[in-house]
Image: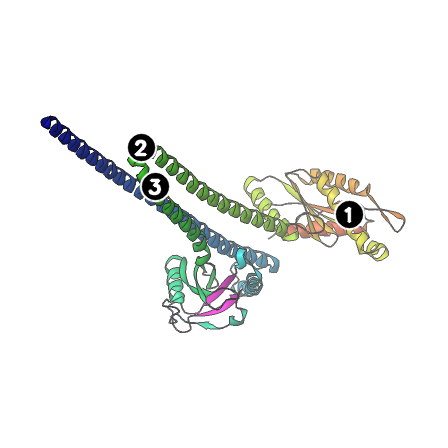
């Protein structure tokens, strides 16, 4: 009996040791598994937040670069248009200089008035000495601090432990463009905030055109995600402690609980990240739509909806280049509404605007897709008839004239008939667009003198010796 009791006692000890070892092993395995698992999950969340931070920063950089690139493109376009308007001959240095002075004046005003999203603005520094120094550049434009325009800038200035002017100058001299980080106060605030700027050199004017965005605005988005990630991590840690106690009772239940908590946490984290990425894509799409609308408004006449003179001239130059390459014909018609001034004087400018819109709509409806109608100024319109020689263009223009002549407008109780006189000129290879328009215009005035409401063919250009 005593032996049996001893064996039972020993067996009980063995079982207790076995249970202790099993419990320690379960706890140890769980702790190792849980620690490695949550460490990996924490790294995954950190990597996801890092990717979000990189995405926000890269999107902001792309937006800043796009804003400056559009401004540089506007300067190039304005230079070409001003030279065309002034009739500058290539190689005429003095005429080109005068034209560039006009462009500088216009672009300074335009850049100063430009506003970007989130109270963004542009600024321009004119470099005097690319080697740097205490008076290396002059501030021409600053959309936020116009009172600083005209002041001289120095690469020797140290602000908040950084030298942004020197970094910017070295970057644009080396690469033509650069991103620079520094501190600058937000509009309406006194304390400087971290800012990222993009600058690009326009060498023809020695201009550095730049814009920027505040980094703390970007950091706020990332900080929110970081806090959510930390909260989720703490929540999972507490759940792990509770799950450890449950694991002592049931390993199976513990595994299920951990799996469910982990799955829900990961799904919630990715859902927030996807929502943030979607919001960024939508914001980019809105910016692109706004830019497309701005471009469309810049090319259209506000009253008639036709192309304006600048847009029409651009299309005409493209058509001339195409004709020079392919030897295909095209014609230009200049049309003027007959007795328009007398109509305005008699019935008022409101009725005159209705005449312009009705004539414009009729012309555009009668043109082919490859043709173009533009309001050339006042009551004068330009038609571009692509692929037509003079004979075909005369027929097409006369159909348009007849269509316009069937239109009537009621004003002050009277039913007024609308009519137009057109001059048509066929393009001759290497002819300047201005000369082509002048020939069509002269033909139109001959039609006015002949009694109006007619289509007159232009004289061929005088041969050059």
What color scheme is it?
A: rainbow
Q: Label 2, secondary structure: give it.
A: loop
Residue 28, image x, y percentages = 23, 39
- Total labels drawn: 3
> Residue at (12%, 28%) from the top-left corner?
7
Up the image or down, 199 lies above or below 279; here it is below
> Residue at (37%, 72%) from the top-left corner?
156
Instruction: Specify whether 271 is left or right of 416.
Output: left
Instruction: Specify whether 285 is left or right of 247.
Output: right
Contact, mark 1 vs mark 3 (Cβ under 8 Å): no
| Residue 70 or residue 314, whichever sits in front | 70
Count neighbours of disc 1 (C-alpha within 10 A) and say few if under 14, some if 14 to 19, many if 20 or more: many
Check if residue 378 falls in the magenta segment: no
Up the image or down, 460 lies above or below 131; here it is above
Up the image or down, 405 lies above or below 158; here it is above
> Mark 1 and mark 3: span between their CA atoms?
91 Å
Residue that badge 1 annotates:
421
Q: Bounds of the magenta span?
A: 121-145
**1 or 3: tag closer to the N-terminus:** 3
Disc number placed over residue 290 in the picture, else none: none
Image quarter of the N terminus: top left
Q: Label 3, secondary structure: give it.
A: helix
**2 or 1: tag closer to the N-terminus:** 2
Between marks 1 and 3 in the image, the one whose residue lies nearer the viewer: 3
Residue 121, image x, y percentages = 52, 60
Residue that badge 3 annotates:
242
Residue 284, image x, y percentages = 51, 47
Between marks 2 and 1 in the image, the one whose residue lies nearer the viewer: 2
> Mark 2 and mark 3: span between their CA atoms?
12 Å
| Residue 453 or residue 221, whichever sits in front | 221
């Amino acid at each position: 009996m005593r032996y049996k009791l001893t064996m039972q006692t020993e067996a009980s000890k063995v079982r207790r040791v076995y249970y202790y070892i099993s419990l320690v092993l379960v706890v140890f395995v769980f702790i190792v598994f849980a620690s490695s698992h949550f460490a990996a999950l924490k790294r995954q969340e950190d990597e996801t937040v890092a990717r979000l931070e990189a995405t926000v920063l890269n999107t902001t950089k792309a937006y800043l670069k796009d804003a400056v690139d559009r401004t540089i493109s506007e300067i190039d376009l304005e230079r070409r248009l001003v030279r065309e308007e002034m009739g500058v001959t290539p190689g005429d240095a003095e005429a080109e200089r005068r034209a560039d002075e006009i462009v500088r004046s216009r672009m300074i005003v335009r850049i100063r008035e430009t506003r970007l999203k989130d109270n963004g603005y542009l600024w321009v520094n004119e470099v005097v000495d690319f080697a740097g120094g205490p008076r290396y550049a002059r501030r021409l434009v600053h959309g936020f601090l116009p009172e600083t325009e005209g002041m001289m800038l120095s690469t020797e200035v140290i602000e908040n432990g950084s030298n942004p002017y020197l970094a910017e100058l070295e970057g644009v001299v080396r690469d033509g463009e650069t991103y620079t980080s520094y501190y600058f106060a937000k509009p309406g605030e006194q304390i400087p905030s971290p800012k990222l700027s993009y600058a690009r050199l326009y060498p023809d004017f020695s201009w550095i055109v730049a814009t920027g965005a505040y980094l703390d605005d970007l950091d706020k988005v990332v900080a929110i995600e970081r806090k959510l990630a930390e909260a989720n991590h703490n929540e999972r840690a507490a759940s792990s402690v509770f799950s450890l106690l449950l694991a002592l009772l049931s390993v199976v239940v513990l595994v299920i609980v951990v799996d469910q908590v982990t799955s829900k946490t990961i799904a919630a984290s990715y859902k927030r990240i996807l929502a943030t990425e979607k919001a960024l894509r939508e914001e980019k799409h809105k910016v692109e739509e706004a830019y497309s609308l701005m471009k469309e408004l810049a090319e259209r006449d506000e009253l008639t909806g036709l192309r304006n003179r600048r847009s029409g001239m651009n299309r005409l130059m493209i058509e001339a280049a195409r004709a020079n390459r392919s030897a295909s014909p095209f014609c230009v018609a200049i049309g003027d509404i007959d007795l328009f001034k007398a109509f305005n004087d008699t019935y008022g400018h409101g009725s005159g605007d209705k005449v312009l819109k009705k004539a414009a709509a009729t012309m555009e409806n009668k043109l082919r897709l490859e043709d173009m109608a533009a309001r050339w100024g006042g009551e004068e319109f330009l038609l571009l008839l692509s692929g037509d020689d003079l004979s075909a263009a005369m027929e097409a223009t006369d159909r348009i004239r007849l269509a316009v002549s069937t239109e009537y407008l009621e004003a002050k109780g009277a039913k007024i008939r609308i009519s137009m006189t057109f001059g048509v000129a066929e393009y001759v290879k290497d002819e300047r667009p201005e000369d082509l328009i002048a020939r069509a215009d002269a033909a139109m005035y001959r039609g006015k003198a002949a009694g109006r409401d007619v289509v007159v063919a232009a004289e061929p250009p005088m041969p050059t010796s």
